[in-house]
Image (cartoon, grey):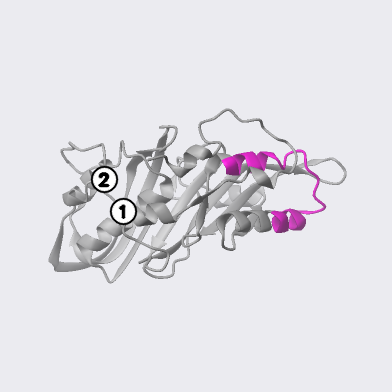
C-alpha cells in the first residue's frame, strides 16, 4: 500500500523557493498509522507533543538585513496531521528572502501556517543563538542500558514478544538507550535517536528492553509512530501506573524531531543531546 508521504516532496528533486510559500507544507494524516496500532483519535492512551527544533532559520528585516534564530515548534500528539519533514524544510527555506517587520510578526505567521497544516494549534518559539548556547548539551536522566551483555538476532521489525517484566516487583525508574535506529519509510535513510522511558509499574527486564529497541533497526516508519509503538508495547507488558516515552532524534536537514508520549502531563526538557 502506498505510504501517504509518497505524494509529498520527500525523496524527490525539489525547487527551493526563497520567498514566503506556505503552500510548501504537506500534512500527513495520523489516522492510518493510529489504525495500524488499533487506535483512533478518540481512544489515544497517551497525551504529548512533538517538539521540532530548526537550526536553519533566517529572514530579512525591513532594512534588508538578515536575521538568524533557532526555532522551536510544538505540535500536539493528538493533532489530526503530522507535517512531512522535507515540506517543513522547504517552507522554512521560503522565509530566507522574505521580509518581516519583527520577530513577533514572523511568529504569528508561522503559528497560523503550521497550525493550519497540523489541524491543531502549534506552539512557535524563536530563540537567539546565545540563549541556546547557554543551555549547553544535556544528558538523559536515569540509567543507560546500552552496556548490557545481550545477544541480538532481530533487526527487521519491532518484536514486542522480546519484552519481559516481573509483576511481583513494582518499581519506579527511568532508563534510556542511544541505540534506537529506524529508517524513513519513503527514502530508506536512517533515523538515529535516543529513547528515554520513565515508568511506575512491573519491573522491566533491561536486557529484554535493549533487544526490543534494537529490533527497530531496519523498521521503516516515522519518528512519531516509532515512539507511539514503543509506548503501546511497554504499556501492555508493564501495565504501569505511569508511563512516559520520548525520543530525541538526530537532526537531518537542519531539523530534529522529538516525540513525547505520556499517560500524564509532562514538561519536556528540550535541551539538545550530544548527537543533536
Q: Which corner quadrant of the image does residue 201 belong to?
A: bottom left
Is 4 left or right of 93, judged from the image as shown? left
The prevailing secondary structure element of the residues shown in magenta is helix
Which residue matches tag 1? 230
Above or below, comparing residue 120 to residue 275 in the picture: below
Is 174 left or right of 112, judged from the image as shown? left
> In what quadrant of the picture does the N terminus appear?
top left
Q: Quick one: which residue is furthest to the top in this view?
A: 13
- Which mark, by number, is residue 114? none
Q: Quick one: which residue is furthest to the right in this view?
A: 63
Q: Write the residue at 72% across / 55% down.
A: 109
For the residues labelled 1 and 2, say whether their Cβ atoms are less than 8 Å apart.
yes
Dot 1: element: helix
Which segment is the magenta one?
Answer: 87-109
Q: Write the residue at 17% across / 49% down.
A: 162
Residue 80 in the image, given as x and y percentages of width and height: 50, 59
Q: Write the residue at 40% across / 53% down.
A: 32
Label 1 or label 2, whichever comes before in sequence order: 2
Residue 10 in the image, given as x and y percentages of width and height: 52, 36
Q: Rounded to the nearest whole Å, what is the CA distance between mark 1 and mark 2?
A: 9 Å
Which residue matches tag 2? 158
Amino acid at each position: 500500500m502506498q505510504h501517504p508521504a509518497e505524494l509529498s516532496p520527500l525523496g524527490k528533486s525539489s525547487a527551493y523557493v526563497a520567498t514566503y510559500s506556505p503552500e510548501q507544507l504537506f500534512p500527513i494524516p495520523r489516522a492510518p498509522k493510529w489504525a495500524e496500532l488499533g487506535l483512533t483519535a478518540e481512544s489515544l492512551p497517551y497525551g504529548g507533543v512533538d517538539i521540532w527544533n530548526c537550526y536553519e532559520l533566517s529572514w530579512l528585516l525591513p532594512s534588508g538585513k538578515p536575521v538568524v534564530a533557532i526555532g522551536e515548534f510544538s505540535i500536539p500528539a493528538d493533532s489530526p496531521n503530522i507535517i512531512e519533514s522535507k515540506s517543513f524544510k522547504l517552507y522554512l527555506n521560503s522565509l530566507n528572502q522574505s521580509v518581516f517587520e519583527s520577530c513577533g510578526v514572523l511568529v504569528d505567521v508561522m503559528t497560523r501556517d503550521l497550525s493550519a497544516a497540523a489541524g491543531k494549534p502549534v506552539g512557535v518559539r524563536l530563540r537567539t543563538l546565545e540563549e541556546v548556547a547557554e543551555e549547553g548539551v544535556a544528558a538523559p536522566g536515569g540509567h543507560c542500558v546500552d552496556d548490557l551483555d545481550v545477544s541480538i538476532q532481530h533487526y527487521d521489525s519491532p518484536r514486542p514478544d522480546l519484552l519481559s517484566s516481573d509483576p511481583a516487583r513494582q518499581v519506579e525508574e527511568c532508563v534510556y538507550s542511544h541505540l534506537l535506529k529506524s529508517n524513513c519509510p519513503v527514502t530508506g535513510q536512517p533515523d538515529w535517536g535516543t529513547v528515554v522511558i520513565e515508568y511506575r509499574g512491573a519491573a522491566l527486564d533491561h536486557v529484554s528492553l535493549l533487544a526490543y529497541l534494537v529490533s527497530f533497526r531496519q523498521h521503516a516508519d516515522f519518528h512519531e509512530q516509532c515512539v507511539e509503538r514503543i509506548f503501546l508495547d511497554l504499556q501492555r507488558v508493564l501495565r504501569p501506573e505511569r508511563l512516559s516515552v520520548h525520543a530525541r532524534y538526530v537532526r537531518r536537514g537542519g531539523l530534529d524531531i522529538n516525540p513525547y508520549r505520556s499517560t500524564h502531563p509532562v514538561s519536556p526538557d528540550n535541551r539538545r543531546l550530544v548527537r543533536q
